[in-house]
Image (cartoon, rainbow, N blue to C red):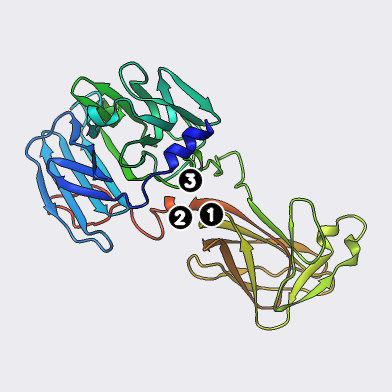
Amino acid sequence: MAALLLLLTASLACAQVELRSAEPLLVDVGGQRVIDGWYVDPEVGAVETWQVEAERWPQAHHRWATGEGSKLRQEVAARPDRLEITHLRYLESNVTGVTSAGVRLPLDVLDGARFECIGTPRGDAEREGATWTGALGPEHVTVIKDLQYLRVDLPGGAVDFDCNPKGAWCPGVGICPGTARFTLIRYDDGWRLWAADGKARRGTIHDFKLVVTPASDLAVAEVHPAVNTRWTQPYTATSRINIGTLDVKRFDAYVQPGGTLTRDERFAELRPERVEGASITADELTLTIPVERDGIYLVSLLAGDPTRQIGPCGLSAGVGEPLEAASVPAGGYACWVTPGRAVGGTIEVSVTGDARICAAQAAPMMFANEDYLLDRGWWVSTDFHADDNLPL
């Protein structure tokens, strides 16, 4: 297993993505053909394809087609480190029972290739944790269902197919039925990687995004770790600091620069983590919370002072406008919450006003590689067809 992991992650550093053609769809990674066509079912009529401008994307193309009870918008965008295929199809009721779409992959490239995946392969494969490993081909694995992430080891370097680029916001099948579920199947004329909607009879909007890159340095299961929440659970903190010098279980001690370290002796015998805290001595206090992954976090601050009222205070951690935290009466404690952005492994939290902070924690909501909401949109370009009235 360890040898396979090393093999799959040792892709060529110089491997690049090349969009050879948008119509027909031809994509190379590391000089090897990995995609050789579109797949759409039911088929569409004449497709209009044109190039669009998109910042930081040397190549971006849109596709548009209409038919009886059907409208199709697709985008393919490429740069040396990444290719994105984005699909949205509107179908009126009773046009079709099942709709599917995706891409074709050549037999001679995938047959015999070793793979890792988050999904459900059929055939000779081994599982460790959430990750399956095996070989593709007629004598090995010919079907992978519920495919979220696929890494294939190829002669020109390993290639990743991210079928759920928004990440594991939902931890299991059935929790979020709106999440696209991909399937990889071998046919006589090639492999097909596609997502389907089996309830199109009543009308549907079928959409997804497929991202193709040279293999990440991260293990397959760590590209989109399932650390997020479902409706019955809170966000899980992955970084915790206590303000002061005490060693507290599950918390890292943190001596705050720019603030005055004070004590609350009421908790000395009961809860040592409540003893110390940093009071603002100037107009602003900055907390630096270390995290393992960049992205958007829910930041919680334990605020309170034994002898005086604190707040209201301003909170800012790099997401949106500063928030105002409510005042806390003398002798009381409260949890102040703000969204925070992690850049370069840290979240910088600015607290302005009269405050005393005892502890802080950060819970990931969306990692940077999953952000299609704040830093960018779902589509690379919104230069859509003049007749396109489909939703974003």
Please state which of residues 159 and 38 is positioned toward the viewer in this rendering.
159
Check whether the beta carbons of the residues at disc 1 and disc 2 lie within 8 A of each other.
yes
Question: Which is closer to the viewer, label 1 or label 3?
Answer: 3
Q: Indicate the amino acid at tag 1.
A: Arg
Please state which of residues 13 and 206 is positioned toward the viewer in this rendering.
13
Q: In which quarter of the image is residue 199?
A: top left
SS assignment at label 2: helix
Reading the image, the residue beneath label 2 is: 368
Check whether the beta carbons of the residues at disc 1 and disc 3 lie within 8 A of each other.
no
Q: Indicate which disc residue 218 carries.
A: 3
User: Where does residue 130 sit, x and y in percent of width and height?
Assistant: 52, 31
Q: Indicate the amino acid at tag 3.
A: Leu
Q: Indicate which disc residue 352 carries.
A: none
> Measuring 28% from the left and 48% from the top, which residue is drawn there?
83
Crowd class of label 3 (few under 14; some 14 to 19; many from 20; radius 10 Å): few
Q: Indicate which disc residue 293 carries.
A: 1
Decide: is 126 above or below 158.
above
Looking at marks 1 and 2 on the same chain, the residue that comes earlier in the sequence is marked by 1
